Each structure stands twice: as structure tokens, then as C-alpha cells.
Amino acid sequence: MTVFSELIASDFPIVLTDDWLQGRTAYGGLSAALCVEAARRAVPDLPPLRSAQFTFIGPASGPLSVEAKVLRQGKSAVFVSVDLSGDAGIATHALLSFGVARSSVISRQTLAMPKVKPIGDSESFFTGDRPLINFQRHFESRFAGGARPFSPGADPEYLIWFRHRDEAAREGIVPLVALADAPPPAAMVIFPQPAPISTITWSLDLLSESPTTNDGWWLVRSTAEIAHQGYSTQTMVIWNTDGEPVASARQNVAIFL
């Protein structure tokens, strides 16, 4: 297995080992993380990442190359577009917004972390005889609430403690982006059986300019709002171990069931 910190430090083009694949492609979180890393390399002294929109256009397979372009650079904000391409052409298009912190009299947040079991008292999220998807072996998980995949009749929501197995990948925004898309879509809770899924779009907002947590653990909540006509939309929130919200997201997923 190639650990995340070694993979993300590689020079482009990058050829992924099988342990980072979801089927025949890189999973969305890794593609997104590679786009953020490419922007950071292309533009020196970027301010913190504030918002990111990712469109997953095709499979990220074969040698992966990137093209990063600054769309606008002002006094406080920088907008960068990144195209990640593989054997089949453009795989992921990213629009990234970086911005410095501003002083403000406005301060409000309503994303309180729900009460969950301590990490040490929680069992692994992935249990049973179903094999892990290749890339999921790079993460540790603890089931914190809601339901597991393939539980028809349950509400399509779960809370999972997640962290990288790679200790060198437990800090920083790029590892966090990769981790944020590691849990399976919440719609899989109501799947009667395993079936293919594919993320189409993912919008991620960072709520802290420098997210930190204890021992690499983050609490991820995913909630499917609707599953209809072969598509599902879901919301996601990530908290650190101190209960501070660090990211929120929306995702559109194609369902082949």
C-alpha cells in the first residue's frame, strides 16, 4: 500500500496503485485532494482554502496530470481552477476559492455536534463479511450513530469517526479533503443490496482556516435528503474532537440500482 503522505508528495503525472481505487478510478476524495494540492503547488503563498466545487466528469485512471490556472487574484481572495486528467481525458474539474480571514462583528454558528459515543467505546463502522473497497483500507473508522449501509427501513444517515491510518496525514487541509469523501454515500443505508455508485458533484465549504483535531479523528455526518430516479443528494458536516464544526458539504451521487 502507498501511504497518503507519500502519494500526495509525488510528482505529476501520478500513477495510482490499486489500493487507492474505487473500481477502475480514484475515489472522489482523492481526486479532490490532488486538485487542492496542485493549486497549492502552482500558486505560492495561497491563503486558506474557503470553498471548493468539484465535478467528477470521468474516470481518474492511468497517469494523472493536472493543469492549474489562476482565475483571479486580489488582495484577500484567490480563485483557482484545476483540471485533473487521466487516460480518458478530464476526470475532475475543480473551482477553488482561497481567502484571508477578515475581522467582523458577525459571529454565529448552528452546527452543534450531536452527542455520540466516545471513540474508544465505538466499534468499527465497517463490519461483517462484505469486503472493503480498496481505498477504504487507508482509513480507520468508528460507528458513532445512525445506521449502516444496507439497512432498508432505517433513516439514511450516519455518523462516523474517521481518520487516516497514515500518521503523517492526520494534519493539514489536503488530507482532510481526502478524508471528507471517504465514507460511503448515506443513501446506501436504504440499499437492499450492494450496487455501484458514483459522485457527480461535491461542494465543500471550510469553516476554519486551519482545522485541527485530536489524534487525527474527525466526526463525519452524512444525511441523504432524497434518492430518486437514480440520483441522491446529501448533506455532510465534519467536526473535530472538541465539537467544533470545520467543514460542511453537499453532494450529488448517481445510483445504479
Image (spheres, rainbow, N blue to C red):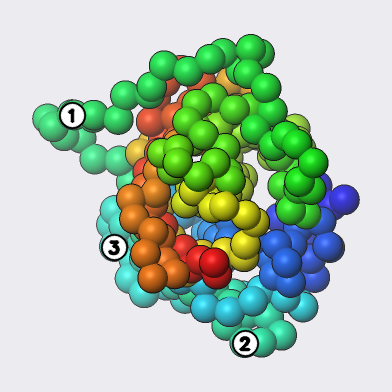
Q: Nearer the viewer, residue 90 or 211?
A: 90
What residue is shown with label 1? 107
Q: Nearer the viewer, residue 188 or 252?
A: 188
Distance between the alpha carbons at the discs numbered 1 and 3:
24 Å
Q: Secondary structure at mark 1?
A: loop
Are dots 3 and 2 in contact, CB under 8 Å? Answer: no
**Within 10 Å of the Cα at label 2, are there few (<14), some (14-19), or many (20+) other Cα atoms?**
some
The amino acid type of the residue labelled 1 equals Ser
Toward which corner of the image does residue 238 lie, by quadrant?
top left
Q: Nearer the viewer, mark 1 or mark 3?
A: 1
Question: What type is the residue that disc 3 sits on?
Answer: Gly
Q: Secondary structure at mark 3?
A: loop
Q: What residue would you read off at disc 2?
A: 89
Decide if residue 25 is on the left or right side of residue 210.
right
Q: Is residue 2 above or below residue 212?
A: below
The percent position of residue 116, horizontal first and vertical second, equals: 48, 18
Where is 203 relative to 190, above or below?
below
Q: Earlier in the sequence, mark 1 or mark 3?
A: 3
Q: Residue at (71%, 85%) from the top-left corner?
A: 87
* Location of mark 3 (residue): 74
